[in-house]
Amino acid sequence: MKKIYSKILLIALCILSLSATAQIPSNQNGEFLSTENYLNDFNKIIIPKCCGETTVPNLIFFYNPFSALTNHDRIELAKEKSLNTWFNQQYQNIKSEIESQLHTTFPNFEEAKNTYFKHWEKKNLLSHANFVKDKYDNRINVRKGKRDKSVRNLKLLELREIELNIGNIDNTSYGS
């Protein structure tokens, strides 16, 4: 009886807690969205042009509502330019390494990459071809062994048939 009362009390407590939380009003625009419209302010942001500029403009230190965002854009542009120069340097390093391995010179990275890829695939194809050939040969040998065993059994059956026709029913000379 005690267990029944405790279960009823637990169910009632759950129902009351659910109905209490159901009464809390929810924000229709979303919990973290404000009702003020800030989207029109982003039209005034000055974004530095990335194309055609040789250097990244300096940071702005005078007060401007958008100076922080402009400075952030300029920092990101500087990171991107330095990253691009680093990538270009790595492309040259990889190209020179490919040239040293293949003992040829290439006009650009793409041609070096494609030639090295073909070289690598050809090398791997030749090294793995023996494995595939051996696997195929093993399958052929297994099939050949099964065929030979079947032919042997067929010949034994024919010899047994000849024995039976002769009259040798009990003592067979062939097979088991």
Image (cartoon, helix red, strand yellow):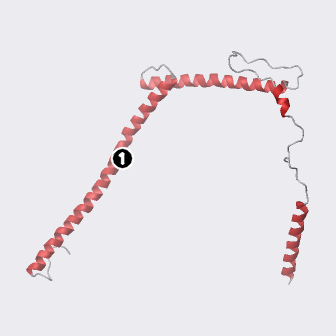
Q: Is residue 128 left or right of residue 62?
A: left
- In the image, 170 versus 42, the foreground residue is 42
- Where's residue 54, x and y in %? 69, 15
Q: Is residue 176 left or right of residue 25?
A: left
Quarter assignment of residue 143:
bottom left
Residue displayed at 76% across by 26% down = 73
- In the image, 11 versus 44, the foreground residue is 44
Tell me: residue 163, above or below residue 144: below
Q: Which residue is mark 1?
A: 132
Quarter holding the N terminus is bottom right
Quarter assignment of residue 80:
top right
Tell me: residue 164, above or below residue 22: below
Badge 1 density bin: few <14, some 14–19, many ≥20, Cα 10 Å: few
Tell me: residue 123, above or below residue 161: above
Q: In the structure shown, which secondary structural element does the residue marked by tag 1 occupy? A: helix
Tell me: residue 66, above or below residue 143: above
Q: What amino acid is found at the position of numbered circle 1 in the picture?
A: Val
Q: Is residue 132 left or right of residue 174?
A: right
Quarter assignment of residue 85:
top right
Residue displayed at 17% across by 70% down = 156
How many marks on residues? 1
Q: Is residue 40 left or right of residue 75?
A: right
- In the image, 109 versus 131, the foreground residue is 109
Residue displayed at 89% across by 65% down = 19
Whether residue 173 is visible, yes or no, is no
